[in-house]
Image (tube, rainbow, N blue to C red):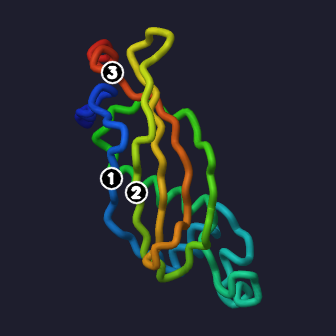
């Protein structure tokens, strides 16, 4: 069974709208397990050796931080009928994600423009931040996406 198509179309997107996810606490085991599979650098995978690192403990890989962002973003923006993502601008990992940190994500619609080519979609830019329990920014960037218009969604059904 195919999931239902998300209800919000390009026309429904409101510039300035902000959304916030629930929180998620990150464990040392999660950091180590993810890193062993996808980014096996010693300061991500070896808690004892990581004590001698700049961070003083294991920290999450940037790829892991992005995966957590995606999970929390889906929670708050799954109702948007995206065509696809086009890329990220101004991508910054501002602070390390450490074991025991509790994070949340906010998204804010920065801009939207209808297609200049006449295609049934528009471009939306959202600014994202992931913050920890202290309010420190862990990750921030701008995400550029195509979003279906009502006409575009109807043409695909």
Which residue appears farthest toward the top when viewing the image?
Answer: 118
Whichever of labels 2 and 3 marks the residue nearer the N terminus, that label is 2
Question: Do callouts 3 and 1 mark residues in contact (Cβ within 8 Å)?
Answer: no
In front: 154, or 48?
154
Question: Do callouts 2 and 1 mark residues in contact (Cβ within 8 Å)?
Answer: yes
Cα separation between marks 3 and 1: 21 Å
On the image, numbered disc 3 is attached to which residue? 149
Q: Residue at x 42, y 30 (%)?
A: 112
Label 2 secondary element: strand
Cα separation between marks 2 and 1: 5 Å
On the image, numbered disc 2 is attached to which residue? 106
On the image, numbered disc 1 is attached to which residue? 19
| Residue 19 in picture, x, y percent from top left | 32, 53
| Residue 105 in picture, x, y percent from top left | 41, 60
| Residue 68 in picture, x, y percent from top left | 47, 61
Quadrant for the C terminus in the image:
top left
Labelled disc at residue 45: none
129 displayed left or right of 22: right
Which residue appears farthest toward the front when viewing the image?
Answer: 16
In front: 109, or 8?
109
Q: Residue at x 68, y 64 (%)?
A: 39
In front: 2, or 16?
16
| Residue 62 in picture, x, y percent from top left | 62, 62
In front: 41, or 79?
79
Q: Residues within 10 Å of mark 2 (few under 14, many from 20)?
A: many
Whichever of labels 2 and 1 marks the residue nearer the N terminus, that label is 1
């Amino acid at each position: 069974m195919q999931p239902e198509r998300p209800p919000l179309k390009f026309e429904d997107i409101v510039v300035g709208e902000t959304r916030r996810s629930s929180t998620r606490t990150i464990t040392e085991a999660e950091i180590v397990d993810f890193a062993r599979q996808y980014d096996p650098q010693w300061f991500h995978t070896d808690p004892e050796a990581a004590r001698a690192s700049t961070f003083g403990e294991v920290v999450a890989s940037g790829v892991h931080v992005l995966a957590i962002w995606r999970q929390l973003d889906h929670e708050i923006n799954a109702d948007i009928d995206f065509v696809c993502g086009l890329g990220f601008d101004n991508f910054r990992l501002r602070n390390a994600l450490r074991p025991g940190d509790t994070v949340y994500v906010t998204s804010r619609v920065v801009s939207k423009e209808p297609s200049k080519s006449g295609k049934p979609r528009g471009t939306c830019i959202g600014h994202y931040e992931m913050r920890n329990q202290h309010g420190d920014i862990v990750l921030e960037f701008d995400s550029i996406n195509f979003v279906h218009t009502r006409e575009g969604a109807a043409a695909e059904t």
